[in-house]
Image: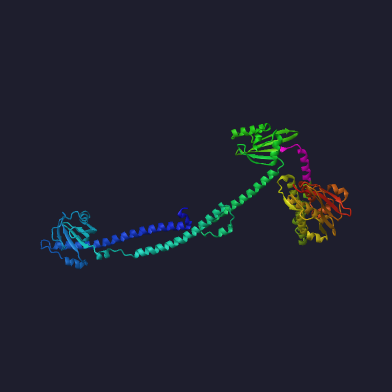
Amino acid sequence: MNGIAFFSFGQKLFLSVTLLFLIFVSIFIIFQYQREKKFKVELLNSKLQDCNDWIHRDLTEIKNKESEFRTALFVEHFGLKDLRVTIIDIEGNVIYDNSEAINRKLANHLHRKEVELALSKGYGYNVRRISESTGITYFYSATRYNDCIVRTALPYDTQLKETLRIDPEYIWLAIVIALVLIFIFYKTTNRLGTSVDNLREFAIHIDRNEPYDYNTIMKTFSNDELGEISQHIIKIYQRLHETKEALYIEREKLIAHLQSSREGLGVFTPDKKEILVNSLFTQYSNIISDYNLETTESIFNIPEFEAITQFINKFQERPTGKEEKCMSILITKDGRNFTVECIIFQDLSFEISINDITQEEQQSQLKRQLTQNIAHELKTPVSSIQAYLETIVTNGNIAPEKVSVFLQRCYEQSNRLSRLLRDISVLTRMDEAVNMLEMEKIDITALVGNIINEVSIDLDKKQITAINLLKRNIQIRGNYSLIYSIFRNLMDNAIAYAGTCIQITINCFREDESHYYFSFADTGIGVGSEHMQRLFERFYRVDKGRSRKLGGTGLGLAIVKNAVLIHGGNISAKSNQGGGLEFIFTLSKEK
């Protein structure tokens, strides 16, 4: 792992900003130091230039006289100890030098730096240069005049260093300001870093598909632009996640619909590879084929599908054409008729549907009959609700008590409508998605015991005694919801219609290698023999007015029969000798 990875974003940002700031401060201090140093040097040079002017004026006054310069007077006036004075002609020859250490003729000074500058600019200085004559380091300042060059120099000793020393106050001020700004940088970058670290942690959790509390993470962001942006990002992700979940649910619904569809459906890639097929598609394609198909893609090799295959190949060769993207053919095989339809999508993937239409007319008739029954059953509660609400809306002077009664009746009718739709949904799932039911080990004895406990209040209200004679550990393999619906619907039916002060008995009176034989009997009012064979029809009622009044849907026993059939059994009803109704049914031990 790279060493910088040990630092968080906020730390790296703080270190980066601090480093850049320290570089800036260092450059500023160095610049200011050089500037102050130059100022000190210029100040000293200006003082020596004034001294040069005095010396030149004195030299002019005593011209043609004995050349004795009043060096002591200069030193006293300017306060310059150990001042060295040198007079140089324009050719660079030394005319005079007051240094006591010199007892010989001095060399030409034309190439001395301060002299060169004086000749070119009128004045010049040299901060630190060792004198070739005395071996002492001096600070030189030279001024050119018309007839000569006057140069003064001070030894570069401790006193002069002290004079040129930079005042450190501005450095301390810069350091204090830098520390204050670094502290401000730390607070700012720490706040930014916290938001980035929280956003990074959120991204890691999301990447790992781990659950995360959105409300908690939203509260951790700072109250600034970055925090606001981070909150918007999380809100956007939350909406995307919710959309993804919704799409996943819809996908599952689509797959469930595909598997429970009454027609064979298959979806393929542009190169004829299987994406998703249901069991009916496999079943129908094998019926159409003269041999068993090992793979779904093999359907494109059987003669009956040649027209479909050519249509797919033709369209894929010219995808930009204006040809129809849908084709349908009729295939007759062994007395059965199938319609095969192919639909090509925009990305050149395609769907093939196979529909067995052999008994289509019969099924259509049954569906029309069922639709009429459903419409008839839905009409009553919907009409009642509409009538009550219309009365409330159109009659502004209706008493509040009557409004409450009407609303209560609307509520009861809506509950009835809800139960009706629920039962229709259960029957539809049993008719269309039998192969998708989840099977498991079910303890019938425990299940019946739970149902008796659930309805105990209703049993007490009607003074009904429920007797469970099932022996322990009666187990079958089946769908829990459907097995539950068998015993619960029979129990609810007995409670609703058998009467009061009766007895209900549940018993398993026989078993063989493959089935259990159950009896569900009551001692109630019973049912007339003319109704006995129609009890399991959908929407059939013995007493229509009484059933609707009690909120029945007319589908309970139809659900019971379908659930029993799905579990490999049969059910029938008969009258008890002492009165009441008894249901005899079987359930397969393994389904």
Tell whether position 452 is magenta: no
Expressed as whole percent of the image width and height from the top left, the position of residue 584 reads 83, 50
* Vertical relation: 92 (above or below) 76: above
Residue lying at the far left in this picture: please name it: 65
- Say which of 183 and 36 sits in front: 183
Q: Residue at x 78, y 42 (%)?
A: 366
Tell whether position 363 is magenta: yes
Expressed as whole percent of the image width and height from the top left, the position of residue 511 reads 80, 50
- Res. 410 in view: no
Residue lying at the far bottom in this picture: please name it: 76
Magenta stretch bounds: 355-372
- Say which of 150 and 536 sits in front: 536
Question: Main SS of the magenta segment?
Answer: helix
Expressed as whole percent of the image width and height from the top left, the position of residue 141 reads 22, 59
Residue lying at the far front in this picture: please name it: 513
Quadrant of the image occupied by residue 397: bottom right
* Vertical relation: 178 (above or below) 208: below
